[in-house]
Image (tube, rainbow, N blue to C red):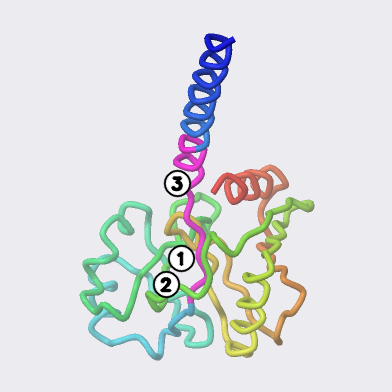
Amino acid sequence: MKTMNLFLVFWLIISSACTGQVNKNENAQKSGVTFGIYETIMPDKLPVAIMDSLLKMGLQDEKDDHQPTLGYMTKMGCADLQSASPDASVKLIKTFYTVDKEHKYHGIVAVKPGILLDNSAIQKAVQINNTVEIRFNLEGAKAWAEITRKNTGKIVAFMIDDEVYALPYINDEIRSGVALIGGLESEELAKKIADKLNSR
């Protein structure tokens, strides 16, 4: 009987250790994706020195102070964006999507480095046609309502793995606890993004 009890205790310890290892591995894989919502910096608020550096690096100026996209660069030109911004209060990011038929040029967006909302706020991401619906958990929904209230009339950046996926204009406070990444080029891309966000 003692041998049987000893065997059961030993089996439970081994079983727990294995389960813990699997959970650690799953969490390690999930922590690879980073999601964040950031406040954008409009071109007319950007330090002149940063814009000059970007132009020297090959930026094609958008010349529109009402949109957060500063201009366009090739993927190769985007490789060292941060060298154009020694100012710690400005982070330069390329868009995930290209803006031309040949798929050579990405938009360049300036954001404030302080993250407004991150992965921990997401409950689930759902693909609906060519849109991704991000459903926030209770804390995330409260934070999203506050962010949209404070940023009404402004544009924010939705970033995944340091690339801008969407630049929504905030019309009003959003209390539903939902945010959208819309206008994607295909349902397949929307599904990949949703899967990526759900694997965080």
Q: Is residue 32 above or below residue 12?
A: below
Amino acid found under the numbered disc labelled 2: Gly
Q: Mark 3 points at which residue?
A: 32
Circle 2 Cα neighbour tier, 10 Å, few/some/many (<14 / 14–19 / ≥20): many
Q: Name the residue under label 1.
A: 107
Residue 36 magenta:
yes
The reply to whether discs 1 and 2 touch (Cβ–Cβ < 8 Å) is yes
Residue 109 percent across, percent down from the top left: 43, 72
- Rounded to the nearest angstrom, the CA distance separating label 3 from label 1 is 24 Å
Mark with earlier residue (3, 1): 3
Q: Please, what secondary structure does the residue beneath circle 1 have?
A: strand
Circle 3 Cα neighbour tier, 10 Å, few/some/many (<14 / 14–19 / ≥20): few
Amino acid found under the numbered disc labelled 3: Gly
Q: Give the residue displayed 52% in from the left and 57% down from the top.
A: 100
Amino acid found under the numbered disc labelled 1: Gly
Q: Could you say which is closer to the camera, residue 144 or residue 64?
A: 144
Residue 104 percent across, percent down from the top left: 44, 52
Mark with earlier residue (3, 2): 3
Mark with earlier residue (1, 2): 2
Residue 183 percent across, percent down from the top left: 69, 61
Region in magenta: 24-38
Q: Name the residue under label 2.
A: 71
- Rounded to the nearest angstrom, the CA distance separating label 1 from label 2 is 6 Å
Q: Could you say which is closer to the camera, residue 61 or residue 85?
A: 85
Residue 130 percent across, percent down from the top left: 73, 53
Q: Please, what secondary structure does the residue beneath circle 3 have?
A: loop
33 displayed left or right of 73: right
